Amino acid sequence: MQELDDYINKVKSLPPAPRILPELLSLLRKDDIDADRVVKLIAFDPGITAAVLRLCNSAYFAGASPASDLQEAVTRLGFRQVYQLVAAVSGSKMLGPAQKGYGIDAGELWEHSVVSAVASQLIARNCGEDESLAFTATLLHDIGKIVLVEALEHIYTDLVENSQSEQTPLIETEKRLLGVQHAEIGGRLLARWNFPENIVNAVWFHHQPSGAQAHQRLASFVYLGNMVAYFMGYGFGHHAFALRGRTEALDILNLKPECLPEYMIKTFEQLQMVKSLVNVNS
Amino acid sequence: MPAPSLTGFNQKVIVGIAEMAVSNNQNVTLTTYSLGSCLGIAVYDPVVKAGGLLHIMLPDSTIDSVKASKQPSMFVDTGVPALFRAAYQLRAEKHRMIISVAGGAQIMDSGGFFNIGSRNYDALCKLFAEHGLKIQAEQVGGLVNRTMHLNLATGEVRLKISGQPQETILCKNSTTT
């Protein structure tokens, strides 16, 4: 744990914690959602408020007349949709920049995260489970990369050579070269940011869902959402496909491999929405 | 009277996922980004200088026949015939067609449960074999995400691999001078 914290503490430009996200998620999980509290929580952050309103009035989401305040946006779009927008606004700031140490250009990690999250949400919905939770965990699954990227930048040539000659998954190469890997760093970072245990565990074990124990279903949604994004071309960086196939993710959810092409098609149908979430801050 | 063709500046036409485009405009470069496990299939007839690019996502239209009727370019078995038909409209001929293929990346999966990339490629090879077509140049499989460009003036096909700075030439159309 200390090693993970050391890496996190070393990062020069760590983004501020997305404070309202875990709180909003817990409000959303109650049967009787308190609309006033949701609006108050979002209104606390003027940047997010403006982005939610802008998106609510964008071509994809807009109704007949523009929403002029948060209350109206929440009423019109519904809690889940507003939550998704808030998550996207917070996520794009953190995951938008280029991650040179991974060979990832500006915007690519964010695009990967959104497509993964949308795919994961669709799978969770079909399995009858909390789709906002799956969306959030998957949206943030690679957050550890923003911590490790600085360290990797110095040894990028080693990383590339290593993964090329050994044909090992990125996560194992990270572990060998740095002593830590991005999934556990991401889990630890989210724990420090007060995200709930289920999200922390799902991110921590997103390359090995059975390790998440009580939260292995959520980790499996993250794993499969991530896969769908890769298959569809939304996975970037050097040796982007250096990942291990884990059938446990299918077994845990009682899904067959044939469902993967179907979820690719379902995700493809959501690409218009993906686009508006990807461009949430521009 | 035919419309005057635009000359003197280069145009980049983007082919999206599950889309295709054909052209005989010498100023055009067809580009399809980030193939992942999808396949990019470029065809080019050097005599009439016409060609096309297809970005298929899945091997077989039986996965979703409704989707296939709306978006034939999503699947190998419906997309490839559509690409050839469109190229024939530009007077390209089958026996002159130079075929390049890229994409079909694969994660490390010995069990083959996540093998969308290789299934796409197998379906394509089977279809080509049935029609007596040969792939001239290919870079398929592996762990990388590729972007593909087809230059319609030269027939040259270039690849850009995510994480690598420079482009590489996949097919330098040897019949042009």
Image (cartoon, grey):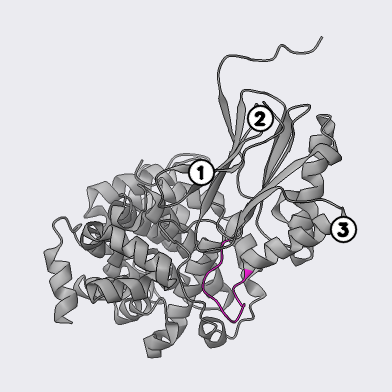
Residue at mark 2: chain:
B
Q: Earlier in the sequence, mark 3 or mark 1?
A: 3
Give the structural element (helix, strand or loop) at label 2.
Answer: loop
Q: Disc number at residue B152?
A: 2
The picture quadrant where one finds residue B75 is: bottom right
Q: Nearer the viewer, mark 1 or mark 2?
A: 1
* Disc 1 residue type (three-letter): Thr
Question: Residue A218: within the magenta?
Answer: no
User: Horizontal placement of A185 versus B32: left or right?
Assistant: left
- Give the distance between the C-alpha atoms of the residues marked 3 and 2, in whole angstroms: 27 Å
Q: Are marks 1 and 2 on the same chain?
A: yes
Question: Residue B107: within the magenta?
Answer: yes
Q: Which residue is mark 3?
A: B130
**Quadrant location of the C terminus of chain B in the rendered image:** top right
**Quadrant location of the N terminus of chain B in the rendered image:** top right
The picture quadrant where one finds residue A21 is: bottom left
Give the magenta-colored segment's residue range.
B105-115
Q: Which residue is mark 1?
A: B168
